[in-house]
Image: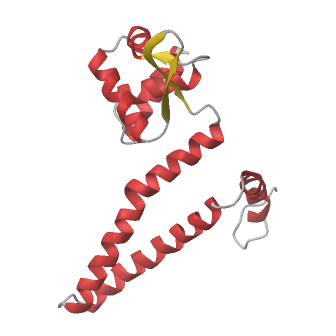
Amino acid sequence: MQNFILHWGEMGSKWGVNRSVAQIHALLHIAPDAMTAEEICDTLNLARSNVSNGLKELQSWKLVTSSRQLGDRRDHFTSIRDMFDLVDMVIKQRREREFAPTISALEAVMDEADQDQTPPKVRERMGEMLRVMKMFDDWYLDFSRLPRAMHLAVLKLGSKLVRFIPGGRSDD
């Protein structure tokens, strides 16, 4: 358990997340039951303020939820348990926080470029960037509306499909 939590914490910095936030998430993801902030502090040896801030960040990402238990005034926290749902939420949140705002910014920049003295080569490059990003975003939005069974079927088909595409890998 300790090695997993430490590794997840190390990966957090690569994902743009504070190490302690990633460690809190790792602990909650593998914990058999919901945990209080105090239990998280004790287990990870983190300051209460650090745990509180980490939990708020994880809740803003919708990766952690809180609940109450009868006879206990404290909040109890748990991570999304299902790995498929967890990955789906991370992708959805990354899109909302990073990808969609970049598309909006590029659309605004392209509108400005059509009105000002932006060189044609620069407009062309920004336009290409916008078209490709919108293509991936449209694909994601269409795909995300499909039921989970369809997601799994497409993911399983993916490696088989690549064999039929020129330049795709073969089983040889």
| Residue 164 % position (x, y) | 79, 69
The front one of 8 and 102 is 102
**Considering the image in quadrants, where does the C terminus appear?**
bottom right
Q: Which residue is drawn at 43% across and 24% down?
A: 23
Q: How many marks?
A: 0
Residue closest to the far front = 71
Looking at the rendered image, the quarter that the N terminus falls into is: top right
Q: Dividing the picture into quarters, in which one does residue 114 lie?
A: bottom left
Report the coloring of the rendering: secondary structure
Residue 18 image offset from top left, x and y in percent: 34, 33
* Residue 102 relative to residue 90: left or right: left
Residue 136 relative to residue 83: left or right? left
Residue 95: x and y in percent read 46, 57
Image side of residue 61 versus residue 48, left or right: right
Which residue is drawn at the image coordinates 62% and 59% (left, top)?
144
Q: Is the residue 41 above or below the residue 95 in the image?
A: above
Q: In this view, does 32 lie above or below 63?
A: above
Q: In terms of depth relative to the viewer, which is nearer, 64 or 137?
A: 64
Look at 44% across and 52% down and name the residue there.
94
Q: Which residue lies furthest to the left in this view?
A: 117
On screen, residue 132 above or below 41:
below
Task: Look at 38% across and 70% down and name the residue there.
Answer: 103
Query: Splitting the image into 4 quarters, where does residue 154 fall?
Result: bottom right
